[in-house]
Image (cartoon, helix red, strand yellow):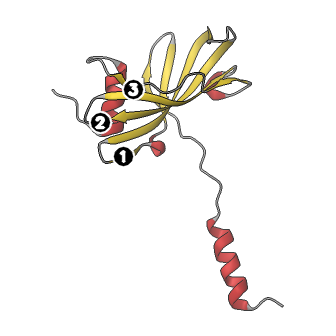
Protein backbone atom coordinates (compact mmCIF):
# COMPACT_ATOMS: atom_id res chain seq x y z
CA UNK A 1 0.00 0.00 0.00
CA UNK A 2 1.33 3.39 -0.99
CA UNK A 3 1.57 5.87 1.84
CA UNK A 4 -0.24 9.20 1.50
CA UNK A 5 3.05 11.08 1.53
CA UNK A 6 4.49 8.97 -1.29
CA UNK A 7 1.25 9.29 -3.27
CA UNK A 8 1.26 13.06 -2.79
CA UNK A 9 4.88 13.22 -3.99
CA UNK A 10 4.06 11.16 -7.11
CA UNK A 11 1.04 13.36 -7.91
CA UNK A 12 3.15 16.49 -7.41
CA UNK A 13 5.84 15.21 -9.80
CA UNK A 14 3.30 14.12 -12.41
CA UNK A 15 1.51 17.48 -12.24
CA UNK A 16 4.76 19.28 -13.05
CA UNK A 17 5.49 17.05 -16.07
CA UNK A 18 3.68 19.09 -18.69
CA UNK A 19 4.37 18.68 -22.40
CA UNK A 20 6.51 21.35 -24.02
CA UNK A 21 4.42 24.30 -25.17
CA UNK A 22 3.67 24.63 -28.87
CA UNK A 23 5.40 27.35 -30.81
CA UNK A 24 3.65 30.69 -30.75
CA UNK A 25 4.76 32.09 -34.09
CA UNK A 26 4.54 35.88 -34.35
CA UNK A 27 4.98 37.71 -37.66
CA UNK A 28 8.37 39.42 -37.67
CA UNK A 29 8.42 40.61 -41.28
CA UNK A 30 6.08 40.04 -44.21
CA UNK A 31 6.93 40.39 -47.89
CA UNK A 32 5.12 39.24 -51.04
CA UNK A 33 7.39 36.19 -51.44
CA UNK A 34 7.66 35.06 -47.79
CA UNK A 35 6.68 35.79 -44.20
CA UNK A 36 9.21 35.49 -41.39
CA UNK A 37 7.91 34.43 -37.99
CA UNK A 38 9.69 34.24 -34.64
CA UNK A 39 8.72 32.33 -31.51
CA UNK A 40 9.38 34.82 -28.67
CA UNK A 41 9.26 32.02 -26.08
CA UNK A 42 12.43 30.53 -27.60
CA UNK A 43 14.58 33.64 -27.17
CA UNK A 44 17.33 32.75 -24.73
CA UNK A 45 20.13 35.11 -23.72
CA UNK A 46 23.27 34.16 -21.86
CA UNK A 47 26.28 36.41 -21.60
CA UNK A 48 26.97 37.96 -24.98
CA UNK A 49 24.98 35.30 -26.86
CA UNK A 50 21.34 34.76 -27.76
CA UNK A 51 19.31 32.22 -29.71
CA UNK A 52 15.88 32.20 -31.30
CA UNK A 53 13.72 29.91 -33.46
CA UNK A 54 12.52 31.35 -36.77
CA UNK A 55 10.05 30.06 -39.33
CA UNK A 56 10.04 31.21 -42.96
CA UNK A 57 6.74 30.58 -44.73
CA UNK A 58 7.00 30.94 -48.53
CA UNK A 59 4.20 32.23 -50.77
CA UNK A 60 5.07 29.63 -53.42
CA UNK A 61 7.16 26.42 -53.40
CA UNK A 62 10.94 26.92 -53.23
CA UNK A 63 13.62 24.39 -54.19
CA UNK A 64 15.80 23.18 -51.33
CA UNK A 65 19.35 21.84 -51.61
CA UNK A 66 18.07 18.39 -52.61
CA UNK A 67 15.97 19.86 -55.43
CA UNK A 68 12.67 19.10 -53.68
CA UNK A 69 10.03 21.79 -53.27
CA UNK A 70 9.43 23.27 -49.82
CA UNK A 71 6.84 25.71 -48.51
CA UNK A 72 8.52 26.51 -45.18
CA UNK A 73 11.80 26.36 -43.29
CA UNK A 74 12.25 26.23 -39.53
CA UNK A 75 15.62 27.43 -38.21
CA UNK A 76 17.35 28.02 -34.92
CA UNK A 77 19.61 31.05 -35.04
CA UNK A 78 22.41 31.63 -32.54
CA UNK A 79 23.74 35.15 -32.24
CA UNK A 80 26.98 36.69 -31.03
CA UNK A 81 25.39 39.84 -29.61
CA UNK A 82 28.73 41.60 -29.10
CA UNK A 83 30.46 40.56 -32.35
CA UNK A 84 27.29 41.03 -34.47
CA UNK A 85 27.46 37.54 -36.01
CA UNK A 86 25.02 34.67 -36.44
CA UNK A 87 25.01 30.97 -37.13
CA UNK A 88 22.15 28.66 -38.00
CA UNK A 89 22.45 25.60 -35.79
CA UNK A 90 19.28 23.66 -36.61
CA UNK A 91 17.17 23.61 -39.75
CA UNK A 92 14.29 21.68 -41.20
CA UNK A 93 12.60 22.16 -44.57
CA UNK A 94 8.91 21.28 -44.87
CA UNK A 95 6.58 20.46 -47.77
CA UNK A 96 3.68 22.34 -46.14
CA UNK A 97 3.21 25.85 -44.79
CA UNK A 98 4.12 26.73 -41.19
CA UNK A 99 6.48 23.74 -40.83
CA UNK A 100 3.72 21.26 -41.64
CA UNK A 101 3.61 18.31 -43.99
CA UNK A 102 6.53 16.08 -44.89
CA UNK A 103 9.92 17.06 -43.51
CA UNK A 104 12.07 17.27 -46.64
CA UNK A 105 15.45 17.57 -44.90
CA UNK A 106 17.01 18.38 -41.54
CA UNK A 107 20.30 20.17 -40.79
CA UNK A 108 21.77 20.06 -44.30
CA UNK A 109 24.89 22.09 -43.42
CA UNK A 110 27.16 22.53 -40.39
CA UNK A 111 26.76 25.91 -38.64
CA UNK A 112 28.98 28.72 -39.92
CA UNK A 113 29.54 31.98 -38.02
CA UNK A 114 28.55 34.80 -40.40
CA UNK A 115 28.84 38.59 -39.99
CA UNK A 116 25.46 40.37 -40.00
CA UNK A 117 25.20 43.12 -42.64
CA UNK A 118 23.78 46.49 -41.57
CA UNK A 119 20.32 47.47 -42.75
CA UNK A 120 19.10 43.89 -43.35
CA UNK A 121 16.35 41.70 -41.93
CA UNK A 122 19.16 39.63 -40.37
CA UNK A 123 20.26 42.74 -38.45
CA UNK A 124 16.70 43.38 -37.22
CA UNK A 125 16.46 39.75 -36.06
CA UNK A 126 19.84 40.04 -34.26
CA UNK A 127 18.63 43.21 -32.52
CA UNK A 128 15.41 41.47 -31.51
CA UNK A 129 17.08 38.33 -30.12
CA UNK A 130 19.86 40.25 -28.36
CA UNK A 131 17.54 42.97 -26.98
CA UNK A 132 19.42 45.71 -28.81
CA UNK A 133 17.50 48.90 -29.52
CA UNK A 134 17.91 50.13 -33.09
CA UNK A 135 19.66 53.48 -33.42
CA UNK A 136 17.26 56.30 -34.26
Q: Mark 3 highlights which residue?
A: 113
Residue in view at x 73 percent, y 84 percent: 7
Callout 3: helix, strand or loop? Answer: loop
Residue 45: horizontal and vertical position, in percent? 36, 46
Q: What residue sits 23% from the left and 35% below the top?
A: 133
Crowd rating for badge 1 (residues with CA inside 10 Å; few <14, some 14–19, many 20+): some
Query: Disc 2 vs disc 1: Cβ atoms closer than 8 Å?
Result: yes
Q: Spot the residue most to the left.
A: 136
Residue 24 falls in image quadrant: top right
Q: Give SS at disc 2.
A: loop
Q: What is the CA distance from the residue labelled 2 to the residue labelled 1?
A: 9 Å
**Residue wearing tag 1:** 45
Cα separation, mark 2 vs mark 3, equals 12 Å
Mark 2 vs mark 3: which is more N-terminal? Answer: 2
Callout 1 secondary element:
strand
Residue at 30% over, 48% down? 47
Q: Residue at x 31, y 24 (%)?
A: 123
Q: Is residue 54 above or below residue 121?
A: below
Could you tell me residue 53's position as x and y percent? 49, 35
Q: Are marks 2 and 3 in contact (CB under 8 Å)?
A: no
Q: Which residue is mark 2?
A: 81
Mark 3: few/some/many CA within 10 Å (<14, 14-19, 20+): some
Can you tell which of label 3 and label 1 is closer to the viewer?
3
Amino acid sequence: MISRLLLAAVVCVLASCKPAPHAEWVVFEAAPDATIYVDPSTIKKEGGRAEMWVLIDYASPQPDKTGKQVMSDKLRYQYDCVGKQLSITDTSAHAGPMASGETINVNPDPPVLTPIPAGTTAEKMWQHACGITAAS
